[in-house]
Amino acid sequence: MSYQPYAPAPYLTHPIRTSINLDAEIKLYTTPAQRELYESLAELHAIIVTLEFLEKAFVKDSIPPSSYTPTCLRLLGQYNTILGSGTVRAAFKDLDSFKSRYDIDCPAATRRLQTGLPATVEHPPGSSDDSPLPKLTSAPDIAASVTADGKWKNVSPKAAAEATQNFITFMDALRLNYRAKDELHPLLASVITSVDAVTKGEEFDGRKDIVRWLIALNQMRPGDEIDETQGREMLWDLERGYNSFLEGLG
């Protein structure tokens, strides 16, 4: 007994004639510039997926904060560096468009990329702030001022001096009318990471405002600028945070 095939191939009265080699590899690019573009997009895809695994590992305590934070910062830095290219940024469009085009979800990575901060920086131990985002010299000799009477114990003089210098560098940039995201975001990121190295993420007066400004800057498009009022508000918040930080050093 013969059985009818489930999905028989259509009968061809004329064979298909084509000059295309169906076994040949199809290239996405024909020029070095196109190749570099597709490689950059592939790297962005890999960063998003890797960041998703990292966030889940952190939530499950599969990775300690000491390893999570630098790894997350490195991935965020790589992501922003690749998008620094105008050609890549134009092809990327935005995060939602990129995820939809390549059918990836990664909600934890999306959150991290939107804030631009590791979870350990955004929500340090003991922090429960859920308030909304805001509207858009030389360093002193800190080594001699770090004493046992300070709020934070066993502070490295080198780490304290680095955090202080980063504070001053950022505030000087605001006084010199630096307004673009590309100019301010890296400097402010250096402030919060160096400060947290001293305080171990402990809250102090002004820290929440610094984090909010950093998130606000991260959500701006490359080339966008803050206005004069925002610059003054940011400088006010940074000066308050800087003074509180110095008080904590003792």
Image (cartoon, rainbow, N blue to C red):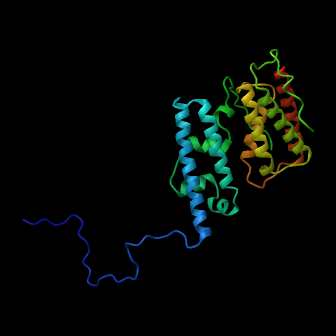
Asked if one can make out residue 114 in the rendered structure from this viewpoint, the answer is: yes
> Compared with residue 207, is residue 74 higher up or lower down, i.e. above or below?
below
* Quarter of the view holding residue 142: top right
The N terminus sits in image quarter: bottom left
Name the residue at 78% across, 25% down: 204
Question: Image point 63% across, 62% down: which residue?
Answer: 91
Q: Position of residue 100 (x, y in %)?
A: 54, 55
Q: Is residue 113 left or right of residue 2?
A: right
Quadrant containing the C terminus in the rendered view: top right
Q: Is residue 113 visible?
A: no
Q: Does 24 sit left or right of 27 as displayed?
A: left
Front-most of 164 and 108? 164
Residue at the image position 58 percent from the left and 43 percent from the top: 109
In this rendering, position of residue 9 left or right of residue 182? left
Q: x, y percentage for residue 75?
A: 62, 45
Q: Measuring 26% from the left and 74% from the top, which residue is drawn there?
A: 10
In front of the other: 238 or 172:
172
Q: Position of residue 110 (x, y in %)?
A: 60, 45
